[in-house]
Image (tube, rainbow, N blue to C red):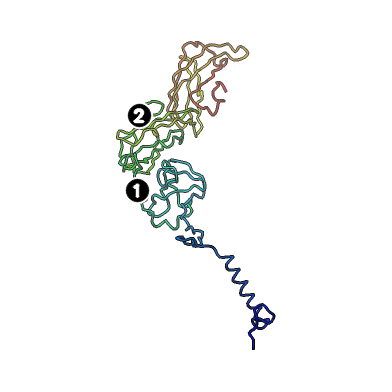
Amino acid sequence: MAAPEVGRPGSFGSPRARRDGVLALASALLLVACARPVLPGRETPAPTMAPTTAARPTSPTLVRDVPLRASPSEDAREVAGTVAGTPVRLAGRLDDGSWFYVEVVGRLDALGWVPVAALDGIDATRASVPVVATSGGPIPAAGPGEPRDLPNLVLENVSVRQNQILVALSNDGYTDLAGPFTVTVNGGPPHSITLPGKPLRPGDRIDNPLAGEYVQRRATVDVVAATQVQEQSTEDNRLALTVEPDLPLDLEILTVVAQPQFTVTLRNNSPIPLVGAVTLTIRESRPSDRLLTRVDDAPLSIPKGGTQEFRIPAVVGADLTRIQVLLQTSAINDSDIRNDVYPR
């Protein structure tokens, strides 16, 4: 039997065999078309994957506007202001964890104490923050260029209590302040401050009344604190504030007599001694209203509840039923001007 001829119907067997051959050829051509050529000496680079980024730890932040303070106390001096959301670095803490000493990220000059309630994101790092102070103990070591072993006397406030000047003093340095130190008001004589049995430790504060320094009227006072020991700075040892009495003051004409010499007696109804100057005017009663005499800037010095007499020799033989005496003074805030006239 003769072999089948190539290309003629019936070659390579059945129609199914011919179909399978065509499919195999098409698959081979597709693989050739999709293949990437490999050049001599080079390898096809492996597919690259996008790099994964590990989560970076975030800094603790402030949850509200809060001042940084010189020591761990709400009464301590403010050293810098911050706003909510500010990132900070934890530099130290109180032993009980109630306050943290922080540095504002990016601001090397902004360091101070904040309460723990003002911080967020500290749980992971709380235990690793070093204890740098205990209640009443020292504040952290000084930063670069700062004195590390000096106290610092601060005049925090000047106020009035029962018409007497009261100063608030603190130590925001790094060592105890044993004194002595003094306070002057408006350039007057110095007042020695007595400490309550122990040195003024870092972070401590005292309120001290100044003997003999009273407030008689609304006015600005210039107060300076000083110490004989070296301190970090003297820039915070001075305050100029406007003060006024917190209790009413009253000066009145108590009596007027014509014999043996015309005399006007004033009484101090105030809770403090009064000093200054007064003006006394003596006139005839209406309808005359003639000026008899006037005493300007007569020195006033009356203890609490006391009296002072003013003799006026220029008035002779006056009829007390026909005169009027008027008291004027800028030395005090007089709460009752009705008793500044005689007769009333």
User: Which residue appears at 55% of the width and 25% of the height?
Assistant: 337
Residue type indicated by callout 2: Pro
* Image quadrant in which you'd find residue 22: bottom right
User: Which residue is depicted at the point 53% across and 16% down?
Assistant: 281
* Vertical comparison of 262 with 221: above or below: above
Give the CA separation, mark 1 to mark 2: 30 Å
Count of residue discs: 2
Q: Give residue 341's position: percent from left, percent from top.
A: 55, 21
Q: Callout 1: few (<14), some (14-19), or many (20+) C-alpha neighbours within 10 Å? A: some
Alpha-carbon neighbours of circle 2 within 10 Å: few (<14), some, or many (≥20)?
some
Q: Which mark is residue 225?
A: none
Quarter the C terminus occupies: top right
Label at residue 190: 2
Q: Which residue is mark 1?
A: 137
User: Residue at horizontal 45%, vertical 16%?
Assistant: 311
Q: Whole-percent x and y of residue 1?
A: 64, 89
